[in-house]
């Protein structure tokens, strides 16, 4: 029986890349995202993503899922369990980006980044917890960074949401270990090419990597729960742990040298 992954924000970018990778490895995929109709500035819908992923020969279920809406989340989870009867990976990839000082972050913007990031990851994970406990298996992967307080200046609202996601992943690893339910956080070593990095003008392709590196790291986390459970991981570092050596394959431009995304780089983004 194929394993099943529920991936939020899977209609494009990192989520779609993760879906392709897992489908190639034989996983069935739930494409969970808001977009059901084409948008001029954002490529892809849950239906176009599902069609792409089906080329790998696995089952794909597109479900509309707004991670700010608990009823939408619960309906998507119910549809997943009705179709597949199990859940092996919950990948909380949907995210909202806002890199501004606190005095430039009104409450509606704070609510957005909190609702999509920490609250959304919490609600999606909660919707599947009973099933994972019943199975005595499952792995939650949240796309969020190791907690580094040096990231806070210029990103307070964003970090509250993202650090909250990391706390969820690491907390699950302890709270649910008797049920064999794992939790990991995953963050890129460099900026990843996506609609967000393009629309927010976060550098240019010479300093980016392809989303494939996150997809490969996601797969390896699921392959190595003994090494990944309870940890906040960096994609490149974890891939090195499990034996990867070729990172040139992930460059957006062959001649480029991507810049490592650390707290100093994030601080520089304020200027």
Image: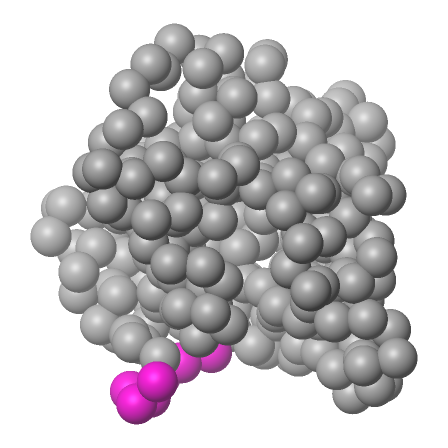
Q: Nearer the viewer, residue 88 or 198?
A: 198
In magenta segment, residue 213: no
Q: Is residue 127 left or right of residue 244?
A: right
Image location (x, y in percent) of residue 211: 36, 47
Image location (x, y in percent) of residue 52: 17, 60
Magenta-colored span: 34-41
Location of residue 180 by image quarter: top right
Q: Is residue 227 visible?
A: yes
Q: Is residue 65 left or right of residue 247?
A: right
Location of residue 10 by image quarter: bottom left
Relative vertical location of residue 270 with respect to residue 222 in this rendering, above or below = below
Image location (x, y in percent) of residue 267: 72, 52
Image location (x, y in percent) of residue 133: 68, 37
Q: Is residue 130 visible?
A: no
Q: Is residue 198 left or right of residue 184?
A: left
Relative vertical location of residue 84 with respect to residue 155 in this rendering, above or below = above
Q: Residue at x 87, y 73 (%)?
A: 102
């Amino acid at each position: 029986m194929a394993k099943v992954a529920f991936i939020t924000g899977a209609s494009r970018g990192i989520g779609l890349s993760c879906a392709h990778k897992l489908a190639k490895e034989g996983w069935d995929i739930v494409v969970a995202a808001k977009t059901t109709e084409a948008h001029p500035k954002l490529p892809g819908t849950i239906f176009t993503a599902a069609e792409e992923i089906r080329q790998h020969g696995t089952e794909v279920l597109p479900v509309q899922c707004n991670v700010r809406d608990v009823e939408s989340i619960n309906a998507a989870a119910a549809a997943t369990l009705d179709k597949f009867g199990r859940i092996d990976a919950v990948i909380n990839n949907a995210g909202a980006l806002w890199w501004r000082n606190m005095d430039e972050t009104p409450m509606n913007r704070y609510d957005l980044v909190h609702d999509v990031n920490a609250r959304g990851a919490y609600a999606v994970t909660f919707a599947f917890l009973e099933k994972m406990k019943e199975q005595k298996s499952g792995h939650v992967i949240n796309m969020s960074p190791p907690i580094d307080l040096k990231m806070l200046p210029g990103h307070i609202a964003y970090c509250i949401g993202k650090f909250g996601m990391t706390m969820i992943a690491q907390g699950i690893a302890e709270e649910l270990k008797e049920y064999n339910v794992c939790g990991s956080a995953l963050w890129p070593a460099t900026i990843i090419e996506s609609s967000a990095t393009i629309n927010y003008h976060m550098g240019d392709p010479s300093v980016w990597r392809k989303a494939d590196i996150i997809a490969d790291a996601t797969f390896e986390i699921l392959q190595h729960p003994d090494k990944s459970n309870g940890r906040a991981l960096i994609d490149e570092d974890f891939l090195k742990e499990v034996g990867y050596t070729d990172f040139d394959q992930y460059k957006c431009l062959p001649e480029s040298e991507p810049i490592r995304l650390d707290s100093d780089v994030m601080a520089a983004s304020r200027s």
